[in-house]
Every structure is written in C-alpha cells, then in structure tokens.
Image: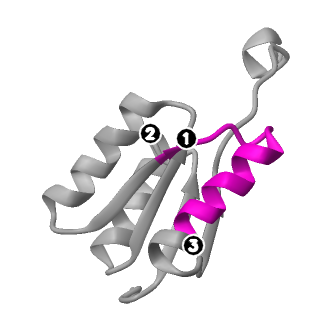
C-alpha cells in the first residue's frame, strides 16, 4: 500500500485498531492526525509513528461534540491543507454497551 503524500485523520486512533491503522498508514507514507479523547495514549501513538520516521500529531476530540470536530478538522487543514482519508474508528459508549448485557447460548 502506497499512501505517500496522503493526509489521514483517524478517530479513535489512540489504541487498538485505531492505533494499528495509524501506524500502518504512516508506514505507508501518509501524514496522520491521531484523534481521540485519550491524550496520553494518543501521544503514545504519535511517538510510535515518529520513532519510525513518520509524520503525525495528536488532536484531542470527542466525536459527539460538533464544535470539537470542526476545530480539529480546521487544525488538520491548517497544518496540512486538506484531509484525503478519514477513518471513523471512535467508539461511543454511553453506559449501555455490550458490557452491560449478558448473552448466553444453550446447546442441548
């Protein structure tokens, strides 16, 4: 995969699939905006990318807050002029996610 010269914004980029996507895209040549509510883990992702000579920065953002989304998009466009790739990986959990339910399957 060649993403040389592409600009990627990855929400939920601080850990898990988001982190792996951010690192993979950077390794393929993209400049990556790591976007997440978790500043500490987001900056760890940026450091992983930079350690491999990639270009990245972290932006704190809650995808449920429209003004934060607008601000982060503006920051990316001001820094790199555009966004070519958007990965919406952020998960939203308002207390009624999978962990609050129990699923059982009985096989007779």
Residue at numbered disc 3? 77
Answer with mark 3 or mark 1, whichever residue precedes in sequence.
1
Q: Residues within 10 Å of mark 2 (few under 14, many from 20)?
A: some
* Relative to 41, residue 22 above or below: below
Whole-percent x and y of residue 26? 33, 70
Q: CA distance from mark 3 to mark 1?
A: 17 Å
Q: Are marks 3 and 1 in contact (CB under 8 Å)?
A: no
Residue 104 x/y as whole percent: 81, 14
Closer to the N terminus: mark 2 or mark 1? 2
Is 83 situated left or right of 2 in this image? right
Of the image marks 2 and 3, the number of the one nearer the N terminus: 2
Q: Nearer the viewer, residue 7 or 52?
A: 7
Horizontal arrangement in the rendering, residue 76 relative to residue 101 (left or right):
left
Residue 67 lies in the magenta-colored region: yes
Most distant residue in the front direction: 78
The residue wearing badge 1 is 36
**In the structure shown, which secondary structural element does the residue marked by tag 3 occupy?**
helix
SS of the residue under disc 2? loop
CA gap, disc 2 and disc 1? 9 Å
């Amino acid at each position: 995969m060649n993403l040389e010269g592409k600009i990627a914004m990855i929400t939920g980029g601080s850990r898990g699939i988001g982190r792996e996507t951010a690192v993979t895209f950077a390794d393929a040549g993209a400049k990556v905006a790591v976007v997440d509510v978790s500043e500490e883990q987001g900056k760890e992702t940026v450091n992983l990318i930079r350690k491999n000579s990639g270009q990245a920065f972290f932006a704190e953002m809650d995808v449920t807050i429209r003004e934060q989304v607008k601000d982060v998009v503006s920051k990316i466009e001001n820094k790199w002029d555009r966004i070519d790739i958007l990965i919406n990986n952020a998960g939203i959990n308002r207390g009624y996610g999978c962990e609050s339910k129990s699923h059982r399957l009985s096989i007779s």
